[in-house]
Image: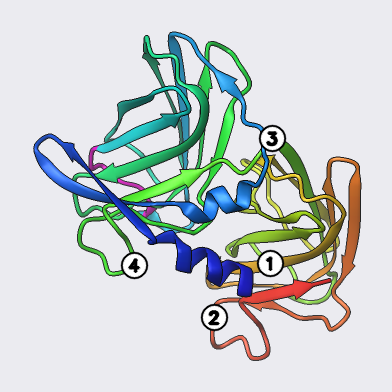
Amino acid sequence: WFGFSCCLAEFGKQWYQRRVRGVTTYFSTMIVVFLLLGSTFYLTIAGRELKVTVRTEGHYSYTGTTDTILMRIHGASKDVEVILGNNFPAGSTKTITYDVSENLGNVYCLDIETDGDDWWWPRTITVEVEGKNPVYFYNIFNQKLSTNDIDASPAMWMCTQGTSSCTVQATTATGANSNTDDLVMMATIYGAKGPTMTGVFDNQDIDDFEKGETNSFEFIGMRNVGAIKCIAIRALAGPDAWLFDTIKVTCGKKSKSFKNKDYTWLSVDERDVGAVTYLKLC
């Protein structure tokens, strides 16, 4: 947890002020993400057609929102602010297209805010300009948006980590109840050059984590971690438990397999005796 705790500690280090419709709102500067990025080179995008694709978490029926969502896209040259909309149902994937004249330069972060108290859990956002390669933003800190919920905030940041790709291949055990349909999980991959954090393990429209089956999850826009050392898996939500046999991580040309030698279950349910919410394998 050390690396992740440091990330959370740095998250609120600096504050800057801006105005939206006459209401003063504060945003925390994500120093942690820039530390995470290191010497990463970002995708340069510029053009008139701006395409934003938003995927909303679907685990709970109330993860969607009908409140108006605003988003500022931060580029090396300029920033642009857009209204994402007010219709993001749970489990949905929605693409919005805009015409913009700004040359954003290297896109590196998004800041997002809500104007209401309707709780929203965005999972992944991609930004694409004029058909160029999309830039991927994962909700790596598991943030939710709302103006009055204790486990949410009215504003959040999402930042790209790099231009590498990582694939996680998970093989579910074959024992009784090893499979899961409901557990929401993410991971941190540790390498010789530092860590990178994945999005949620989920292939859209595929029934993942069935007994004895191997599922692959690709994450684009990861940091180049070099030689892979460890993986830490976090269970975030869901009433179910999961037992896996092996996990293989591939980032670029580097791969490493991890065996669940102690047959440790993952779960967030306290009734699952012996299960953990966090498991690190090296």
Q: Residue at x 53, y 73 (%)?
A: 239
Give the Cα distance between marks 2 and 3: 36 Å
Residue under pointer 1 = 233
Residue under pointer 2 = 269
Label 3 vs label 4, nearer the camera:
3
Badge 4: few (under 14), some or many (20 or more) residues near its Cα, within 10 Å? Answer: few
Q: Is residue 188 above or below residue 135?
A: below
Q: Earlier in the sequence, mark 3 or mark 4?
A: 4
Label 2 vs label 1, nearer the camera:
1
Q: Is residue 173 above or below residue 271?
A: above
Magenta extent? 63-68
The amino acid type of the residue labelled 1 equals Ile
- Mark 1–mark 3 contact, CB under 8 Å? no
Give the Cα distance between marks 1 and 4: 21 Å
Q: Is residue 216 visible?
A: no
Residue under pointer 4 = 151
Q: Earlier in the sequence, mark 2 or mark 1?
A: 1
The amino acid type of the residue labelled 3 equals Thr
The amino acid type of the residue labelled 4 equals Asp
Q: Within the magenta stretch, is there residue 256?
A: no
Give the Cα distance between marks 2 and 1: 16 Å
Residue under pointer 3 = 163
* Majority secondary structure of magenta residues: loop
Label 2 vs label 4, nearer the camera:
4
Badge 3: few (under 14), some or many (20 or more) residues near its Cα, within 10 Å? Answer: some
Q: Residue at x 41, y 47 (%)?
A: 157
Q: Residue at x 36, y 48 (%)?
A: 64
The amino acid type of the residue labelled 2 equals Asp
